[in-house]
Amino acid sequence: MPPRFWDVLGWCRLALRGVLPVDCLGCGQSLRWDPTPYLCRPCWDLITPLSGARCTHCDRPFVSQTATAWSPVHRCHSCLEHPPSYDRAWTLYPYIPPLRDALCALKYRNVYGLAPVLSRLMIRALPPDLNVDVVVPVPLHRSRLRAREFNQSLLLADRVGRYLMRPVSTIDLVRVTATEPQTALTRSKRLRNLRRAFHVRNAVPFAGRHVLLVDDVFTTGTTVNECAKALRTAGAESISALTLARTIDTSLVPDRLLAASHARSFTPPRG
């Protein structure tokens, strides 16, 4: 869309908020005079891609910027000890507010309008060397899909596939086990929770192809790794994983982002 279209859309949204005010998902401030969607402009500006030295396999950030200075293909200890089944993972943004607020609003409050907005964030930070034949969203079990009524990974994958002009496979990789939510489990339990939870019921779209797995959040990587195992068994030539956000240690988050996040959530005492 041309820039003028988005300008007009923003001002139309601004006029509507004069009648129906909306609060920012991140800081709670009124968006009455801010033409940006869902988050105020300062909150949107806080969402910046991960940068610095990272594992060349799972994309895990390293504490030291010099970790890859003499070894550009350096891998983290976890990948060296237990190599993942995927060939490469890209995790684009840190899973911290306000992006975390936006993702939670999409997944748990059914704010569907955030799907195209978050997809644009994903597309903006796509790695330049993607080699893709088919895009695959991480599937939900049918019981979880009935309860939620949508798969957020599919919403993201659909728009990434359109941008890359590649087909999106939505029914060939399935989750066959209704597992507990990963967010409620320890790392060791996460690893056991998803074993053999995914199955490829039609290998034709994947055999000999370069597959891109798409998910919303990368935590331990267990989910995309188990999906990759199933795709590898189906004969995929290569498997990459792309996630919008990654949970990381706060010590790896730039101080300016943490400071801004804390400042915007701080309420001065009264009296």
Image (cartoon, rainbow, N blue to C red):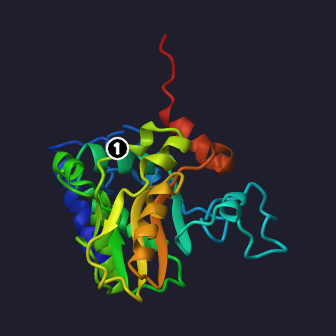
Residue 246 left/right relative to 112: right
Horizontal and vertical percent position of residue 202: 26, 77
Residue 11 left/right relative to 206: left
Write the residue at 28% across / 83% down: 167
Write the residue at 29% across / 50% down: 106
Horizontal and vertical percent position of residue 237: 47, 85
Write the residue at 35% across / 67% down: 119
Residue 111 left/right relative to 53: left
In-front residue for pair 222/30? 222
Label 1 crowding class (10 Å Cα cut-off): few <14, some 14-19, many 20+? Answer: many
In-front residue for pair 93/10? 93
> In the rendered view, would you say 28 is above or below 55?
above
In-front residue for pair 13/266? 266
Horizontal and vertical percent position of residue 258: 60, 43
Horizontal and vertical percent position of residue 42: 47, 51
Residue behind mark 1 = 24
Residue 217 left/right relative to 114: right
